[in-house]
Image: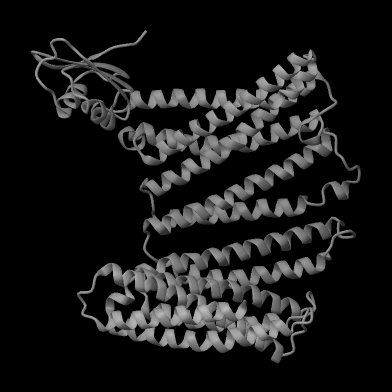
């Protein structure tokens, strides 16, 4: 199978090279789509050959410097040889030909396929090189038994990354470099943050005397965390502090800063919830483990994650402030609505658990949700509410202030529409499923004649979901209606329009498209002269703002009359 795969790869590479050479020799008036298809396959194969050649070289170099095989690996040696012998020459040939094309044709260097290849190859090489560097250092420090294979991988993949970094600086435009720089920044920050969490968490466990039963030993975990912190910080310094942080403040840059900072805040919220819940269960709940060291075994790690998450969030907020990015763009709206949704989801879960805990307390303590007691369920509900509600309220307050300041812009933004649609859609689905489950449980006990407290206990989760989704839907429904009333008259579109006039099967669809509401059309006996969509919309704009409007066409013209359906 390996031989067949290699033969297929060779055939594909040869075909792509020949097709590309033929395309390059043609006049520059060749169809643009032909060039795009050629570039796509050319750089896709080039990336695949890079991976194949690097894997083969890493395997061979590891054997040369004394890497110890885990198992009998004659087949592994054969694979490394095949990948090197086939992949390396083909990659070198295709890379040489691609270089000629890039130098000969400026459009080639500006193509998206070329930028995608360099970005993907650079980030792949960077990720593997970072992992190999970390493993090499840990092997040198004795944390892992054999670091020779990691050292070989570091040499090969690090060389590939350095070569692509050099190519990237010279043959990729500044605009197309942005994704590469931000992707490297994310890799470095994620690795550094993970290493710092592991280091601080293991140090906390060691200070509290929790290391007797932890595998691997805390000393090894601290070394691993420190190495990850150092490797990640080095990459983050190169990609972010020296490069991406100084680039143009375009939507991609703004989205990176906002979303990475938001990820830090989410990490802090989740980790803080874990710490708070664990502490409350120990103090006033019913812990499953009576030994304090074992009960709090994961608390130092969660506390470290919460602290690091806050630092990441705070730093990126300062970056925004220092950059002077004050305009309320759609990217910022997406960020705020996303964070509000996350906080709302946690609060909704807490409200559901609160109802569940209340029902468990009423009907008895025997069976509890998620295998914990009613007291612990109540503590979990309180934790989710305490942590999720402030997050939701903080971001929702910003949104409300923006809506009050510029209602025409904020209330019509796509981010707000998606937020409300997803909220109502997910809430409706959850409510329907909960209702079906609850009714099924009730009728099952009704048919068997066992309706009683146990029935209510089995229905506790569906009841909690129905109540929480109902409360959230009711509040946001009121927000939606209030928002429509805040819109200026020219931007206000009614929810329901009844068209009464001459027969015109297309006008109802056109008006519905313009207003975004429900439209019905009735034919009057004296419908007047034919009307147009512009006349209907002009009549709607001239009438008082209302959610329900009757549009009448008669001999005197088109009139819009606010109505209220009983």
Q: What residue is rendered at 37% in x and 31% in y?
A: 404
Q: In this rendering, is residue 464 above or below 287? A: above
Q: What residue is rendered at 39% in x and 54% in y?
A: 324
User: Which quadrant: the N terminus?
Assistant: bottom right
Query: Residue furthest toward the bottom?
Result: 64
Let me know if residue 155 appears in the view: no
Q: Is residue 474 left or right of residue 325?
A: right
Q: Position of residue 209 (x, y in %)?
A: 87, 57
Q: What residue is rendered at 28% in x and 27% in y?
A: 492
Which picture quadrant has residue 384? top right
Q: In this rendering, is residue 247 above or below 368? A: below
Q: Position of residue 289 (x, y in %)?
A: 89, 43
Let me know if residue 251 appears in the view: yes
Q: What residue is rendered at 73% in x and 60% in y?
A: 200
Q: Is residue 534 left or right of residue 359?
A: left
Q: Is residue 538 left or right of residue 283?
A: left
> Considering depth in this image, is 321 or 188 the residue closer to the camera?
188
> Considering depth in this image, is 176 or 8 the residue closer to the camera?
8
Query: Residue furthest toward the top?
Result: 566
> Considering depth in this image, is 63 or 192 the residue closer to the camera?
63
């Amino acid at each position: 199978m390996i031989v067949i795969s290699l033969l297929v790869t060779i055939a594909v590479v040869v075909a792509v090279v020949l097709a590309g050479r033929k395309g390059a020799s043609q006049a520059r008036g060749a169809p643009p789509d032909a060039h795009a298809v050629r570039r796509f396959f050319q750089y896709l194969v080039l990336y695949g050959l890079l991976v194949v050649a690097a894997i083969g070289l890493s395997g061979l170099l590891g054997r040369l410097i004394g890497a110890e095989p885990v198992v009998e690996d004659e087949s592994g040696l054969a694979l490394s040889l095949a990948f090197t012998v086939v992949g390396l020459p083909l990659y070198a040939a295709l890379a040489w030909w691609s270089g000629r094309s890039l130098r000969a044709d400026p459009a080639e260097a500006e193509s998206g396929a070329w930028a995608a290849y360099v970005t993907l190859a650079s980030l792949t090489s960077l990720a593997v090189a970072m992992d190999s560097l970390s493993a090499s250092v840990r092997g040198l420090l004795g944390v892992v038994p054999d670091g020779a294979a990691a050292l070989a991988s570091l040499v090969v993949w690090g060389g590939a990354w350095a070569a692509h970094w050099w190519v990237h600086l010279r043959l990729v435009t500044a605009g197309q470099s942005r994704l590469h720089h931000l992707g490297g920044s994310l890799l470095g920050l994620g690795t550094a943050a993970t290493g710092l969490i592991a280091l601080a968490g293991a140090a906390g466990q060691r200070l509290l005397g929790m290391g007797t039963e932890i595998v691997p030993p805390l000393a090894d975990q601290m070394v691993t965390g420190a190495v990850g912190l150092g490797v990640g910080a080095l990459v983050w310094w190169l990609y972010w502090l020296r490069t991406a942080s100084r680039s143009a403040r375009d939507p991609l840059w703004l989205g990176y800063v906002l979303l990475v900072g938001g990820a830090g805040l989410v990490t802090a919220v989740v980790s803080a919830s874990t710490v708070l819940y664990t502490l409350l269960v120990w103090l006033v709940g019913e812990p499953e483990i009576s030994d304090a060291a074992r009960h709090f075994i994961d608390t130092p790690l969660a506390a470290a994650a919460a602290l690091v998450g806050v630092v990441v969030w705070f730093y990126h907020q300062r970056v925004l402030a220092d950059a002077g990015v004050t305009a309320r763009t759609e990217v910022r709206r997406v960020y705020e609505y996303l964070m509000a949704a996350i906080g709302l989801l946690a609060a909704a879960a807490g409200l559901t658990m609160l109802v569940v805990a209340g029902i468990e307390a009423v009907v008895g303590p025997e069976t509890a949700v998620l295998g914990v007691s009613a007291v612990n369920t109540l503590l979990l509900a309180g934790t989710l509410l305490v942590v999720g509600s402030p997050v939701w309220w903080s971001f929702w307050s910003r949104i409300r202030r923006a809506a009050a300041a510029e209602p025409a812009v904020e209330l019509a933004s796509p981010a707000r529409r998606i937020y409300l649609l997803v909220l109502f859609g997910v809430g409706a689905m959850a409510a329907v499923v909960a209702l079906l489950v609850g009714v099924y449980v009730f009728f099952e006990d009704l048919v068997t004649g066992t309706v009683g407290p146990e029935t209510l206990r089995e229905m506790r989760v569906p009841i909690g979901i129905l109540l929480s989704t109902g409360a959230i839907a009711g509040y946001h429904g009121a927000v939606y209606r209030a928002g429509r009333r805040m819109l200026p008259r020219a931007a206000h579109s009614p929810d329901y329009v009844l068209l009464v006039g001459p027969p015109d099967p297309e006008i109802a669809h056109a008006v519905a498209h313009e207003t975004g509401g429900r439209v019905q059309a009735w034919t009057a006996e004296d419908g007047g002269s034919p009307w147009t969509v512009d006349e209907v919309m002009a009549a709607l704009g001239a009438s008082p703002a209302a959610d329900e409007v009757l549009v009448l066409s008669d001999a005197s013209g088109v009139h819009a009359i606010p109505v209220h359906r009983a």
